[in-house]
Image: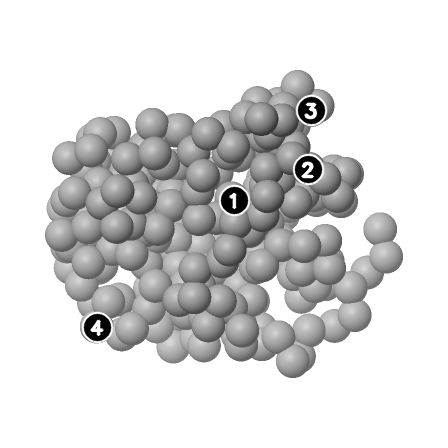
Amino acid sequence: MNPAARPSAALDPRLARAFADVPVVASVVGGKPLRDFLTAPVRVCILASFAVGELPKVVGALGRAQRIVFVNVDSSPGLAQDRGALEFLKDLGAHGVVSTRLNLIEKGRPLGLLTMMKVFVTDRSNLRRSLDAVAHGGPDLVEIMPAPITGRMSQEARRALSPSVAAGFVETAEDVALALSLGSVAAATSDPRLWHLRRDHLPPAPQE
């Protein structure tokens, strides 16, 4: 199958409900922003740079707060890159995992985890590899980095990488609006100011 012809995957209903009001994913890097996340209306987060020993407490607390928690497996010190790590996260109550590694994405779904495949698109050949990986991995979400590159992709490529979350250089409400206008279901950012951005308060999408 031509990867670019991959049909768009349906967005998981839990994510669709979460993004209906706030179309933003909070990138929570280390423990300091946790309080900001818990007091914001954003419902979905990616935990990055949390040591494995910190994860039980943090994931448990966020689960009790009814947040949808993804863990970036690639950037969690002490966390192995194998099925055992995914089982560990599932047992903690994490809803999903983020990784650039195809084998982890493929192992996540049979465990009942949501999967978000991170792809870095820097040129056309890299885009082709990303399309191939997404076609084989079948993730629930694709995190496209950097976000501005989505405006340089063809509609066919954006469709093949959907449902997508635009990430990297998402710094303003206009950046979020542009990502949505290009077909992403949400934008990911570590800026707590954007974790309060509701869909009905989005500015008009800037013209590329």
Ranked by sequence position, the earlier of labels 2 and 3 is 3
Quadrant containing the N terminus in the rendered view: top right
18 left or right, relative to 113 = right
Residue at image mark 3: 123
47 left or right, relative to 3 = left
Residue at image mark 2: 157
**Image marks 2 and 3: residues in contact by CB distance under 8 Å:** no
Instruction: Mark 1 vs mark 2: give the one in front.
Output: 2
Give how far apart the Cα atoms at labels 1 and 2 are.
14 Å
**Dot 3 surroundings within 10 Å: few (below 14), some, or many (20 or more)?**
few
The kind of residue on which mark 2 rests is Ala
162, above or below 95, in the image: above
Residue at image mark 1: 143
Tell me what residue is drawn at x 43 percent, y 75 percent.
Answer: 40
| Residue 38 in picture, x, y percent from top left | 35, 72
Helix, strand or loop at mark 2: helix
Instruction: Mark 2 vs mark 3: give the one in front.
Output: 2
Instruction: Mark 4 vs mark 2: give the one in front.
Output: 2
Ranked by sequence position, the earlier of labels 4 and 2 is 4
Ranked by sequence position, the earlier of labels 4 and 3 is 4
The kind of residue on which mark 1 rests is Glu
| Residue 116 in picture, x, y percent from top left | 43, 45
Tell me what residue is drawn at x 65 percent, y 32 percent.
Answer: 4
76, above or below 136, in the image: below
Give how far apart the Cα atoms at labels 2 and 3 are.
13 Å
